Image (cartoon, rainbow, N blue to C red):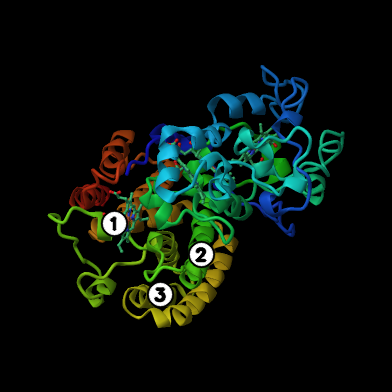
Amino acid sequence: MVCRKLGFLGVLTAALLISYTTVADSAEGYTSVLPQQGDTVHLGVASCASSVCHGKAEKSQTRRVWLTEFRIWQVRDSHATAFDTLLTPASEDIARKLGIADASRAEVCLDCHSDNVAPALRGPKFQLSDGVGCEACHGGSEQWISSHTDDGVSYADNLDHGMYPTAAPDSRAQLCLSCHLGNADKFASHDIMGAGHPQLLFELSSFSINQPMHYAIDADYIQRKGDFTPIDFWLQGMAVAASSTLDLFDQQQTTSNSIFPELTFYQCDGCHQKTDRSFERVDAVWNAVPAGAVRLNDTPIRLFITAAIVLELEGANQALDQLDRLVLAASVKREDIVIHKTALVHSLTALQTQMSERSLLVKDLKRLREGFLALAASNKANYFSYAFNIFLAVNHLNAAIGDGALSEDDIRAWFTIVQTESAYNPRQFAAMAIEFLRRET
Ligand code: HEC
Ligand code: HEC
Ligand code: HEC
Ligand code: HEC
């Protein structure tokens, strides 16, 4: 499986956005009901797209926002074609294998590939064929469309009227992950993957950069919406991904009607690797799992805990222990899953609170970069999505530190090893990390 377009250049541009200050979450205190779950009417993209609103050809010189957002979305953002994807031969093929007559009419596909709100909440200009439109992220606009352009209306006023808080890391992570990981209402199960759906890989900071940006993070934006760095999005995004993964895992364990647990929670290459390549079991948990068992894909959880350990947060080592127990239970003793999960959720919540209260200094970022390089060098990244996310972590940190310890060429060379699942080579990945570490010290 290929991570087709994860814009390598997009990943690199993180360097342009860096500043170190962390500022209070300007969306704090707002209940962030996801746009799809809200109870306000979605008026449709056409309601935002007029040439006097967000559909201008040239950036506005007088307003706070560009007003070209619709054009950017329509021309460059793959969310605009998410519905059209359901009409392609690839989707027809997936639908056929699943016994679905038409993917573009199936709720299971529409829930992530369009703004599939209840029919009663669709305004006169609303069209499902607009795909993931403005209101799928910014929330139904019924209550704020007329007021949000008035003079003196603040971001907080808009949020009060039901605009979704897309600016803050936690709430943005909840939003993006609802489709890029799944949630209680929508989920890309192994049946769907088995029918040919791409594996969902998501990392908040790089995906935020890779979505063609229709806004500028300038002084005015920071003043209105808060100052969040790519590192904040990376860390908080991972924390939310970790807790969302646990929630989903729990639900799917109990709702799956198959005799097997839901396989998308396990490491794909545990089953799908070529059998002529031995699967190296390099860490302690693995050694406790009997040969032949499949292992939970704990990527965001393990990485978040790794960051917490490097930063010496209280309870981080205990969380790692709880995660190891959960992984073991998920492979060999499924009746114990619930106990270990509950303990881990507690620990993660506490770690997330500590993390969000901590402002990171350059020396912390350097320790994190070294910590993640050491993880890569330890040869534990035998699993593709794990390695891929370690790469992104080091890349974000290296860009944020900006000391050039790893050059663009280094990053590019390392990226070629984790660019595709099929070509991923764990030994090369570790060898290059060892080389980077040796040079640094
Ligand atoms: C309503 C569901 C939904 C939400 C919410 C959503 N996405 Fe997406 N996203 C999709 C779908 C579906 C695609 C694939 C579109 C296609 O190619 O058909 C996609 C594609 C992308 C891509 C392109 C990926 C690639 O491999 O080319 C990026 C980047 C992205 N989304 C980032 C984000 C970010 C950042 C957020 C949160 C601010 C977000 N998305 C929220 C459904 C969603
Ligand atoms: C949980 C949300 C979710 C569900 C359910 C879902 N998709 Fe997707 N789909 C996505 C996302 C997100 C992407 C983009 C993945 C990426 O590039 O990172 C995607 C990508 C795709 C692609 C590849 C698009 C491309 O540009 O290469 C196809 C085809 C597709 N989906 C079809 C379907 C069909 C058909 C269904 C229903 C059977 C479906 N999807 C259900 C979220 C979902
Ligand atoms: C996949 C999610 C997504 C979609 C779809 C989307 N946006 Fe956004 N939008 C964001 C994010 C994330 C931000 C940045 C955070 C913020 O400013 O709240 C943003 C910011 C904005 C801003 C604020 C700029 C500023 O300086 O305050 C405007 C205006 C905007 N979007 C308009 C639109 C319009 C119009 C559409 C549809 C044509 C659209 N967006 C579609 C996610 C999305
Ligand atoms: C416990 C083992 C196991 C795990 C873990 C697992 N799969 Fe599968 N997968 C299977 C089996 C068994 C089949 C059916 C193979 C067949 O039909 O011959 C399958 C089929 C598939 C197929 C269809 C292959 C084909 O040739 O038609 C795809 C694609 C797929 N899985 C993707 C994934 C992805 C992506 C993940 C991780 C998110 C994953 N699988 C995790 C066991 C697993």
Label 3 within 8 A of ligand 4 by Cβ: no
Q: Earlier in the sequence, mark 3 or mark 1?
A: 3
Q: Amino acid at mark 1?
A: Tyr
Mark 3 vs mark 2, CA separation in Å: 24 Å
Q: Are marks 1 and 2 in contact (CB under 8 Å)?
A: no
SS type, badge 3: helix
Q: Amino acid at mark 2?
A: Leu
Disc 3 versus disc 1: nearer the observer:
1
Q: Are marks 3 and 2 in contact (CB under 8 Å)?
A: no
Residue 389 appears anywhere in the view: yes
Return the residue at label 3: 317
**Viewer-side residue, 114 vs 229:** 114
Q: Is residue 95 left or right of residue 75?
A: left
Where residue 333 sits: x, y (%)? 35, 81
- How many neighbours does mark 1 have within 10 angstroms: few (below 14), some (14-19), or many (20 or more)? many
Residue 325's quadrant in the figure? bottom left
Mark 3 vs mark 1, CA separation in Å: 22 Å
Return the residue at label 1: 383
The residue depicted at 33 percent of the width and 76 percent of the height is 328
- How many neighbours does mark 3 have within 10 angstroms: few (below 14), some (14-19), or many (20 or more)? some
Disc 3 versus disc 2: nearer the observer:
2
